[in-house]
Amino acid sequence: MKQIKIIVLLLLGVAVSSCESDYLEPVPSSGTTADSYFSDADEVYTAVINMYDGIQGTNSTDTDDNHSVMYEFYLTEMRSDNTRTKSSEGESAQFESYNVQATNGIVKDYYSSFYNIIYRANVVLDNLDVIEDAGISSAYEGEAKFVRAYAYFNLVRLYGDIPLIDRVISPLETDVQFTRVASATIYELIVSDLLTAVETLDNTYRTRASRAAAQGLLAKVYLTLGNYTQARSLCEDVIGSGYELEDNFKDVFYNETNSEVIFSVGYISDLDGDSQNFSAEWLNAVGRTSGVNYVTDEAVAALDLLGGNRTAYSYRPDPSQAGQYQVVKYLPNGDEDLGIDPVSSDPTLAGNDWIVLRLADVLLMHVEAIMAGADQTNDADALASFQKVRDRAGLTETVGLITKQDLLDERRVELAFENQRFFDLVRFGQAESVLSAFSAANNYGYSSSDLLLPLPQNEINLGKGVLTQNPGY
C-alpha cells in the first residue's frame, strides 16, 4: 500500500503548505480536476490510499510540508508529565513549559495536516457515486468516514471548537473554512462517521481502517463523552474479535502488524516517501534536533515502580549523556543490549509503524467503561481485563479492586509515549491537578487555558476576523 505512487496527490495538489488560505481544497495543479479524474472504482481507490498517505505525513525537515502524525508527540506527550526536550531548545520547548505561542510552527503543521486528511477523506466521499459495485462503495465510505472521524477526534480534543468541513469546498467558501463550530457538533459528526464505519467494514486490515478500529475509536469517543454503556459494549466486541496480547511486550513494537495491533500507521524503512523521522528525533542529535520527547524524571519513577517487565522496553538511559532518558519504543537503530535490531540503515528514514490503537488500550478502556466515572470497581469483567494487561507485564498478583488512580497509573505505564497520557489526564478529570503539580515542580508555566492549544496565527489572519482564538493566547 505504502509504495503506491498516488497520482491524485499530484492532480489535486493536495500536499500544500498550511500557510495557503485554500488548503482545505487546493487549486488543481493541472487541467484535471477531481470531478473529471474520478470515473471508476480503481481511480477512487487511489484517493482511498491517499488518505493514509496524509496520516503518514511527509518525512522531511521542510517547514512547508505536512508532517501529520510524526509531529503528534509534541502536542500530546510533551504537554503531559511524560516527556520533554533534552535541552529546552527552540519552539519545541514551548510545549513542555506550557508557553505555546499561536505562531508555533508545529501547532500550525498539525492543524494543517489533519485538515488536509479531512480533505482527502471528503474527496473519497464526494466520488462514491462513480463506483458501480455497492460493496466496494460501502467499504470505501466506511474507510473515509473512519479517517475523517479519526482526524476530527484529534483536532477537537487539541483545539476545542473548530471549523466543520464535511464535504469538498471551494476556496471561496471562507465562511465554512474559518467559522468555529461547537465541539458537541463536531462530536456528532465523529459518532455518525464511526457508526457508519462499524457497519460497513470488516477486520481485513491493520494499517487501514477496520471494524475493530472503528469500534475501538468510537469507544474512546464515548468515554470522552461519558457514554459508558455504549463504550463497554464496543470494547467487548473488540475483545471478542480475535486480537491477542503479544506474549513479549517488546514484540508489540518490533513485530509489526502483530496480533495485538488494531490500527497502525504504516511506514517502510529507507524510502524517502514512506519512512518516518520521529524515531530519530527521540535520539541524541541524530535528527534535526538535539533530542526531543526525552523521558521525564516523573515518568521514569512511575515506570520503575509500576512498569514490571515493560520498563526495560519503555525507556533507557541515554547512551551518550548521563542523567538523560530516551524512549525505547520505536527505536530506529536498535539496541543490542535489549535484543532490538535496527529497522533501517538510516535512522532518519525509519520504518517503525506508529500504533494508534492496540488491544491493551481497549482492555483498559473496558475497565474505564465499567467503572463509569466511579472512584473504584470490583466488577469481575473489569478485574479480568485489568489482570490480563498486568499479567503480561509480569505483575501476576491477583487484583481484587481497581481504583480510578490504579487505572490511570496502569494506562500511563502500559501506554507510555504512545500519545495517550495527555488525553487520559483530561478524560479522567485529572489534568488540572497533575499538570499544575508537575509544572510547579519543574518551574514551568501551566495554567488551565493550556489544556487547549492555540489555533495557528496564520489561520486567524487568513480568517479576517471570522476565526477566533482560544482564551489565553
Image (cartoon, rainbow, N blue to C red):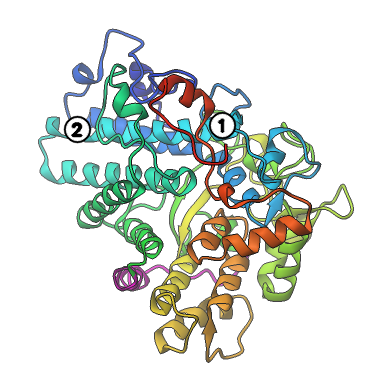
Of the residues shown, which amino acid type is indicated by label 1? Leu
Q: Which residue is mark 1?
A: 271
Q: Determine the main secondary structure of the stretch shown in magenta.
A: helix
Residue 368 horizontal/vertical position (percent) = 44, 73
Say if mark 1 contacts mark 2, CB within 8 Å: no
Question: Which numbered disc, 1 or 2, marks the residue that appears first in the sequence?
Answer: 2
Residue 232 horizontal/vertical position (percent) = 34, 73
Q: Which residue is mark 2?
A: 41
Residue 231 part of the magenta-drawn span:
yes
Question: What is the secondary structure assignment of the residue under circle 1?
Answer: loop
109 relative to 43 in the view: left or right = right
For this rendering, which residue is in front, 415 or 210?
415
Residue 419 part of the magenta-drawn span:
no
**Circle 2 residues within 10 Å: few <14, some 14–19, many ≥20:** some
Give the residue furthest to the top. Answer: 31
Question: What is the secondary structure assignment of the residue under circle 2?
Answer: helix
Residue 196 visible here? yes
Residue 1 visible here? no
Q: How far separated are the C-alphas under marks 1 and 2?
A: 28 Å
Q: Quadrant of residue 33?
A: top left
Segment tinted magenta in the rendering: 228-250
Q: Quadrant of the C terminus?
A: top right
Give the residue at x 32% y 54%. 210
In the picture shown, does residue 337 fall above or below 152? Answer: below
Give the number of the disc on residue 72. Answer: none
Of the residues shown, which amino acid type is indicated by label 2? Ala
In the picture shown, does residue 380 fall above or below 170? Answer: below
179 relative to 410 in the view: left or right = left
